Image (cartoon, grey):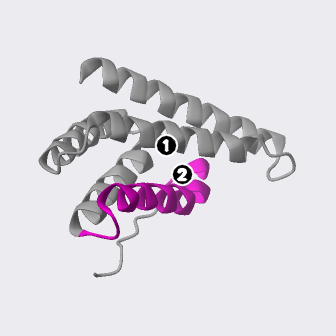
């Protein structure tokens, strides 16, 4: 398989969390499909792009990407509940990192926390519309 494409983010939380999110998401899809497959790579790539836009507070793009992710998941017969569970686990993992003392300054942790709250809120709004 070709190397994974990496795009760079603009927000602080998106920058430091992108490798963590990518590793988690790709691993989740590999688990769903029994290894690294074209389906796990395609869904993983779409899902990472969604998270990048969520954390960069690009709500309009995130809504579009979420819909496209759902369509792609349906083609692969992957339940939407699985995609939702991956999102919940990503949120939980990021929150765990944010809660660790001493990893970043108080202001950085606050800003990152607010970005994470915004991402969770956007996901909630998208779920209402979908």
Label 2 near label 1: C-beta < 8 Å? yes
- Find residue 98 and report its horizontal and vertical position in percent: 72, 43
Local packing at callout 1 (Cα closer than 10 Å; few below 14, some 14-19, many 20+) is many
Residue at image location 43% in from the left, 55% down from the top: 28
- Find residue 58 and report its horizontal and vertical position in percent: 38, 39
According to the image, label 2 marks what residue?
A: 14
Magenta-span inclusion, residue 35: yes
Q: Quadrant of the C terminus?
A: top left
Residue at image location 34% in from the left, 58% down from the top: 44
Q: Nearer the viewer, residue 48 or 107?
A: 48
According to the image, label 1 marks what residue?
A: 55
Q: Which region is colored magenta?
A: 10-37
Give the dominant element type of the magenta stretch: helix, strand or loop: helix
Q: What residue occupies the far left of the structure in this picture?
A: 75
Q: Is residue 31 visible?
A: yes
Q: Nearer the viewer, residue 46 or 86?
A: 86
Q: Quadrant of the N terminus?
A: bottom left
Residue at image location 43% in from the left, 37% down from the top: 85
Of labels 1 and 2, earlier in sequence is 2
Q: Is residue 44 above or below residue 11?
A: below
């Amino acid at each position: 398989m070709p190397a994974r494409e990496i795009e760079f983010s603009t927000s602080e939380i998106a920058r430091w969390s992108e490798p963590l999110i990518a590793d988690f998401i790709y691993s989740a899809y590999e688990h769903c499909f029994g290894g690294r497959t074209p389906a796990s790579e395609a869904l993983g790539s779409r899902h990472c792009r969604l998270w990048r836009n969520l954390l960069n507070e690009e709500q309009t793009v995130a809504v579009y990407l979420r819909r496209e992710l759902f369509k792609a998941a349906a083609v692969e017969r992957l339940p939407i509940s699985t995609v939702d569970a991956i999102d919940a686990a990503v949120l939980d993992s990021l929150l765990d990192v944010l809660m660790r003392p001493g990893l970043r300054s108080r202001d950085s942790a606050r800003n990152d926390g607010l970005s994470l709250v915004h991402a969770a809120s956007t996901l909630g709004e998208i779920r209402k519309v979908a």
